[in-house]
Amino acid sequence: MLFVAGAGCTAPSGTINASENATAAPGTIAASYVATLNQPSAQSGYLKMDTDIYNAGEVVGFTVTNDGSETLACAGNPPSFSVQFQAGNGLWATRMGTGEPNASETSSLAPGASTQVYRFVTTGWDPARYRIVHDCGVEREFLVRALPAATPAPVACPADTVTVTPWITISPPGDLYAARSFTLHGTTNLPAGQELFFTIFSVVDEDPDQAAGDEELFTTPVEEGSCGTNTWSATGEIQATGEFFIWISDAGRNTTAIKRFTVYPE
């Protein structure tokens, strides 16, 4: 038989400038943080947003403020907007709104004046680059990204109230076949890093514990587990068929376990 001890346990283009702690208008879901993207034109700055990057499901809020010295001519009274997204071919397509300004009515935005606050929700939107197209001739791009994966809450281990006796278990080996590599494994409350000693031998004696003392011993380390239950494993190969025992113990043979299993013809 041959045994080898094994382990037991198993952007978008353009510069993004980011800073923390964004605040949104009251009644909205605040953006996770403030970040700005390179924009298609200088007038993109007229369209005021709290950030240029949103998680899917957050509310986008914006106004248009005429920071220039000339009056902006706007379609619609009041003017509206549409949102486009950049498809995989690089072309822009309409995500919300008509995509066509209301040419039947017009209005204007004087220097220093601002529009109403516009808001829309990005729930269900795919991660992509989007563009707000306002009827006063102002455009601004932003990103929607997928929600970050939630960090699972750590499992609370029960409090130790009594001293636990050391123990070792051996998991059921399952079907093993001659001349095929296999792994035996189990659990223990012995500390991680401690070496366990094991052997595998044929069922030829009535006293397996005594027989184990006559066999060559191999070692395998205890691997870190959780809540005080650690693991061990041993990989090997048996050329013969029949009934066998695996016996495993700590160095002082104070804590032992033994299990019988069958090796079948290949």
Image: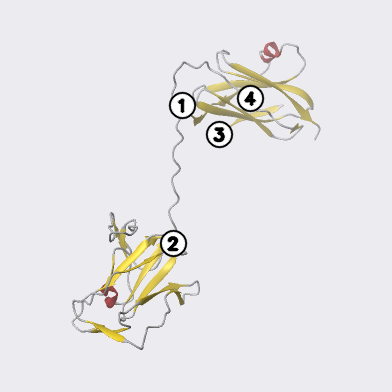
Vertical comparison of 151 with 14: above or below: above
**In percent of the image, x 31 and y 61: which residue is there?**
35
Q: Is residue 246 left or right of residue 92?
A: right
**Which secondary structure, mark 4?**
loop
Crowdedness of circle 1 by 10 Å Cα count: few (<14), some, many (20+)? few
Q: Earlier in the sequence, mark 2 or mark 1?
A: 2
Question: What label sits on residue 9 in the rendered view?
Answer: 3
Instruction: Quote the CA–CA distance across marks 4 and 3.
Output: 14 Å
Q: Which residue is tagged 4?
A: 170
Q: Which residue is tagged 1?
A: 158
Q: Amino acid at mark 2?
A: Thr
Instruction: Quote the CA–CA distance across marks 3 and 2.
Output: 40 Å
Rendering coords of residue 1 (x, y %):
72, 26
Q: Which residue is tagged 2?
A: 123
Instruction: Quote the CA–CA distance across marks 2 and 1.
Output: 39 Å
Number of numbered discs overlaid on the protein picture: 4
Q: Earlier in the sequence, mark 1 or mark 3?
A: 3
**In percent of the image, x 49 and y 23: which residue is there?**
191
Q: Is residue 242 left or right of residue 127?
A: right
**Front of the two marks 1 and 4:** 1
Question: What label sits on residue 99 in the rendered view?
Answer: none
Q: Amino acid at mark 3?
A: Cys
**Front of the two marks 1 and 3:** 1
Residue extending farthest right:
265
**Which secondary structure, mark 1?**
loop
Q: Earlier in the sequence, mark 2 or mark 4?
A: 2
